[in-house]
Amino acid sequence: MGRESHPAGEFGHWSRIELLVCEGVGTARASAFSTAAYGAAGAKASVAHNAKRGWAFEWRYLTSWQCADKRSRGDGAILHTRGSHLDIVDSWLWYKQLRMPTFSSSAILFDLDGVLCDSTRQVDREWREWAARKGVDGDAVMAIAHGVRTVEVIRRVAPHLNVEEEAAAIENHEAYDQRGVTMMPGAFDLLRSIPTGRWAVVTSGSRLLAKNRLLHCGLPVPDVLVTSDDVVNGKPHPEPYLKGAAGLGFAPGDCIVIEDAPAGIQSARAGGMNVIGMASTYPAEVLGQSDVVIKKLAQMQVTSNGAGKLAIAVRGES
């Protein structure tokens, strides 16, 4: 679906697509909507990939007056067929036809940096200053620094140093240097909408760093806070998120994880959990193991589903 200007990733994170095909602008039947026949080459690749992940394809054939009604109300996109291609004729608000999923879970496990707190500038500054002091390639450090424990970064880029001492020095300094760290938009309201005891934070940073960062951003410190101090194996190993689920008293498969880093997504997946990826630190294209990818927390809405569980509705970016 789409034109050559639409990259594959643009359609790579939706769980369901409804195609609206207008009478009089092309011949369209069910056979026209095979998963191999959508759009230009880039979008076609995205559809073929996501068909394996359980996409639901729906189509409706609209009469001329229905198309005219949609045009007047501006609440949908009209597509026409061109051979095996489907082009968007009217692109206004077409994303409203891309339906995002609703998850049912007992609890939500949040990563911290890049999800609840925007600390990208601070993390980059801290690591690059350390790298310059130690004669290490700063770019090589930043390529792996997000989402994993400090000790694991140092082991990979500077194994000749005293890893434990270096990690402790970095995290202690970072805990008291919150310059440039801000709350992610929508974080406070989202956490406030979740019942007590139904959410936790699972981070690769130390407990001191995590607490200081939450307090600095004006966010509550949860009763269950899993940090690098609490695990033997950091992300992408499943131990951190498994501890988060256990701390809340829920089975791993009954929890959903909000993550911004590939290592964290792998950790949650290895623990048997659903994942909502957040394209804040990394581009959406590298968060492909997530069930769905969002750009901001405001795309999530949490309510009680009346059966003792949380309904986490995810909508497209507005």
Image (cartoon, helix red, strand yellow):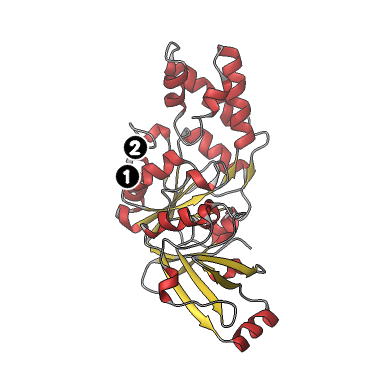
92, above or below 61, in the image: above
User: Residue at 51% of width from left, 46% of height from top?
Assistant: 285
Is residue 289 toward the left or the right of residue 78 in the image?
left
According to the image, label 1 marks what residue?
270
Is residue 297 toward the left or the right of residue 45 in the image?
right
Image quadrant in which you'd find residue 310: bottom left
Q: The C terminus appears in which quarter of the rendering?
A: bottom right
According to the image, label 2 marks what residue?
237
Image coordinates for residue 120, horizontal then vertical, percent: 60, 36
**From where the camera sits, is residue 155 visible?**
yes
Extreme residue in the right direction: 72
Q: Residues within 10 Å of mark 2 (few under 14, many from 20)?
A: many
**From where the camera sits, is residue 197 visible?**
no
Local SS, label 1? helix
Image coordinates for residue 252, horizontal then vertical, percent: 31, 52
Q: Are marks 2 and 1 in contact (CB under 8 Å)?
A: yes
Answer with mark 2 or mark 1, whichever residue precedes in sequence: 2
User: Residue at 58% of width from left, 21% of height from top?
Assistant: 138
Query: Residue type at mark 1?
Result: Ala
Q: Residues within 10 Å of mark 1 (few under 14, many from 20)?
A: some
Extreme residue in the front direction: 83
